[in-house]
Image (tube, rainbow, N blue to C red):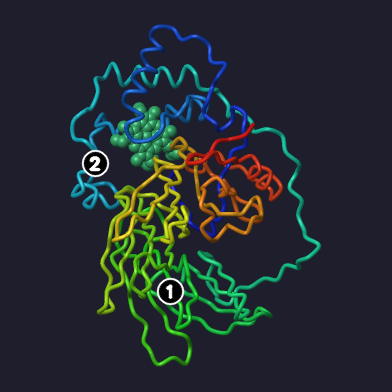
Amino acid sequence: MKLTLLVAAVALCLPAGGAWGQGTNPKAPALSLALQKGRDNAVKYCAACHLLPEPDLLTKTAWAHHVQPEMAKWLGIERVDYEGMQDGKLLQEAALFPNAPLLSEEEWFSIWDYYRALAPSRPVPPPAKPPVTVGSKQFRVKKLNPHESAPMTSMVKIDSAAKRIYFGDAFSGQLFALGAEGGLISRMRLKSGPVSLTVGDKGLIVTQIGRLFPSDAQEGVVEFIPKEGSESAAKVLASGLRRPVNTMVAHLNTDIREDLVVCSYGNRLGRFSWFEAKEDGGYDEHVLLERPGSIQAEVRDINGDGRQDIIVMTAQAREAIHVFLNMGRNEFKMETWLERPPSWGFVGFELVDFNKDGKTDSAGGQRRQRRLRAPDEGVSRCATLSQRRAEWFSRGDVLSDARRLQGDGARFRWRR
Ligand code: HEC
């Protein structure tokens, strides 16, 4: 999934069950010899980088006109024109695409014959759902737009303790603080659009994305901004980040300093890392996942060993939820809890205590008690295949989807 707009995207896109979006086709007819060959080749070549996508995930046209030309670069079938490509130089230096074909032309075309033959002509419709209702009994809408230019809201954060609303605008690269009544308290001009914010005792830790639209430029920063009236100065904690979208502040080792967990989503490059706070005020980066697409992280003690573990959601090819178990001494062990095909479109998750035993945030001891709830409140937009197919989910849908998620130890599966 290409994350084209990161504007207030706080929802897990969950195509509801059935054939739609699940990418499984239990009733698939027996394949002819040629098509079976195509499928075998898809298993062999396509599942090297992400889960094997099933043909019914997308339409014939989408497979032929969108996916085939894109994947041609990744399999060395098409020569990549780095010169004419955005961030081409960066990608060339990273030797991202193979410069010779990884498979024969015959194998290549057999794969696409297979996808085209089995894919539906029109998208498989999602199951019927009640219409979205507009309006709310508890809330009244109040328009907030304290600046003149076109709004491009890139972040919202409510600080309940201080009764403040923070919101970021990526167009003007500003961070606004509003009071309980919606009046403007302060505005700050930042290096670029703020996308993630942590309120601390001494000030704010603000993640600034660099370029908002898909890019591999290393222009993002995580910056400390002191409270108003404070003596201390603003300070960049981490810089040169590839399109960072989320930062968590956490204690990951035994010292008293606060470390950072940063999702550098990037585009074709990018990484997921934690930054160890050093005594001299600096940070050492430890890379957890050397690939793009990390979109949200949470820190919890998952296994009750007293150490903070990290849960991360990734999009871009390997759409998944991974857990990094903290083994102590700055070492982490990765487990993959859930993985979906590359056209899925994950954008966020939330950890919830489904059985209400009070163990959401603390250890719990067993992973069984932990349930991943799908998305956040409200209506979420799910765009797959570069905005070609967008679905709207009401809050009700989202919650009923959440109920379908059932944990079974280390993995999660769908209850039908
Ligand atoms: C070398 C790694 C690699 C291989 C091999 C590969 N892919 Fe991908 N695929 C990616 C990456 C990276 C993305 C996400 C970024 C992008 O779209 O460029 C992706 C995305 C996709 C998507 C989602 C596109 C979208 O826009 O939502 C589909 C579908 C897909 N691949 C199908 C395939 C098929 C079919 C094959 C086999 C012919 C294949 N891939 C082989 C790396 C690979």
Across and down, in percent, residue 267 comes to: 36, 50
- Position of 79 relative to 34 (above/below): below
- Position of 190 relative to 50 (above/below): below
Residue 27, numbered label:
none
Which-is-in-front pick, marks 2 and 1? 1
Badge 1: few (under 14), some or many (20 or more) residues near its Cα, within 10 Å?
Answer: many
Q: Nearer the viewer, residue 130 or 407?
A: 407
Q: Nearer the viewer, residue 248 or 228?
A: 248
In the displayed orientation, state which residue is furthest to the right. Answer: 137
- Position of 147 relative to 319 (above/below): below
What's under tag 2, amino acid-wise? Asp
For image coordinates 26% across by 29% down, the residue present is: 77
Q: Nearer the viewer, residue 201 or 233?
A: 201
Q: Earlier in the sequence, mark 2 or mark 1?
A: 2
Q: Is residue 90 visible?
A: yes
For image coordinates 47% across by 26% down, the residue present is: 54
Ligand 1: quadrant of the figure: top left
Residue wearing tag 1: 205
Residue wearing tag 2: 81
Image quadrant occupied by the N terminus: top left
Give residue 211's quadrant in the image.
Answer: bottom left
Helix, strand or loop status at disc 2: loop
Across and down, in percent, residue 84 comes to: 26, 46
Helix, strand or loop status at disc 1: strand
For image coordinates 34% across by 66% down, the residue present is: 253
For image coordinates 42% across by 61% down, the residue present is: 308
- Position of 135 relative to 25 (above/below): below
Marks 2/1: CA distance? 39 Å
> Is there CB contact under 8 Å for labels 2 and 1?
no
What's under tag 1, amino acid-wise? Ile
In the displayed orientation, state which residue is furthest to the top. Answer: 33
Badge 2: few (under 14), some or many (20 or more) residues near its Cα, within 10 Å?
Answer: few
